[in-house]
Amino acid sequence: MDNANDKPIVEIRRLNFWYGAKQALFDINLGIAANRATALIGPSGCGKSTVLNIVAGLIRPTSGTVQVDGEPVAGPQRKVGYIFQKDTTFPWNTVEENIGLGLEYRGVRAAERRERVAAMVRMAKLEGFEKAYPAMLSGGMRQRVALMRCFITEPEVLLMDEPFGALDTHTALLLHGELLALWERTRQAILFVTHNLSEAITLSDRIVLLGARPSQVRRVVDVNLPRPRDVIAVRETAEYQRIYGELWHALGREFQQGMAEVAAGGAVR
């Protein structure tokens, strides 16, 4: 699947990170293509979220370099959007106010903001809830709001840290489908963390397995499943089953090492 359109928009080179006296990341080298979705998986505590936070410019690496669209990351990036697992909707803002917040911060005129927010509300199937506050919404609806708030700013790179981890299986599957449909229109780079192998295979074009800490890239698996994807039907394909089996066995070995590391001294998220 490598071609001219796969030129990395995010380039991570010889990335190392230490938490005090403990090394979390060791010599991570990774390129994230401009029009692909990449999943980060690995044992709990191996530093997956740390990678996202470094790419987002929220924390600085101990050594190594990270570039977004050819520019070194030295702080929060306008080209990068970030969706967290934790509910990040503002309880004092309505659905439409939450979705339009990024545009407001960027000085987009009110008329244009209303038009773009309305389009996102329709896309997220939230019509009728424009004036509702987060406390009036389900967890899945709040996460849709968070997705739309991020997509409306048209980031070139979308980071997601277990965005569906707190949802029940049915709701997560619905949002998987909505995310895939939305991404088909926007086609930005996505880098996301998940502990769910099915989610990784369903959503991504490439899966990167990080090992037990100090974490290194242990395996990179291309997901050669055609797009657009049906989140249910894709699980019945032979390619899905092959990738699942390969990663399941690889993860089993890393989990054992990760559990030993946690028992020896605690985890790095």
Image (cartoon, grey):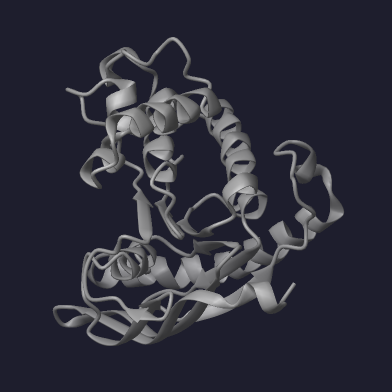
Query: Residue 114, how many percent across, how many down?
Result: 36, 26
- Lateral position of residue 31 relative to residue 94, left or right: right
- Determine whether 202 is above or below 22 in the image: above
Q: In which quadrant of the rendered view does residue 216 lie?
A: bottom left
| Image quadrant in which the N terminus is located | bottom right
Of residues 204 and 169, the one nearer the viewer is 204
Look at 24% across and 64% down and name the residue there: 76
Estimate the x, y position of residue 224 in percent, counting from the top left.
77, 63
Residue 214 appears in the figure: no
Q: Residue furthest left?
A: 20
Q: Is residue 5 visible?
A: yes
Q: How many marks?
A: 0
The quadrant the C terminus occupies is bottom left
Residue 64, horizontal then vertical, whole percent: 32, 88
Horizontal arrangement in the rendering, residue 234 relative to residue 198 (left or right): right
Residue under the point 79% across and 60% down: 242
| Residue at position x 21%, y 69% in the image | 75
Instruction: Give above or below for 95 relative to 167.
Output: above
Asked where in the image residue 47 lies, by quadrant, the reply is bottom left
On screen, residue 53 versus residue 121, left or right, reads left
Residue at (43% x, 75% y) in the render: 69
Relative to residue 248, is residue 61 depicted above or below?
A: below
Nearer to me, 137 or 4: 4
- Name of the residue lying farthest toward the right: 238
Instruction: Where is residue 186? Give x, y as percent.
Output: 57, 49
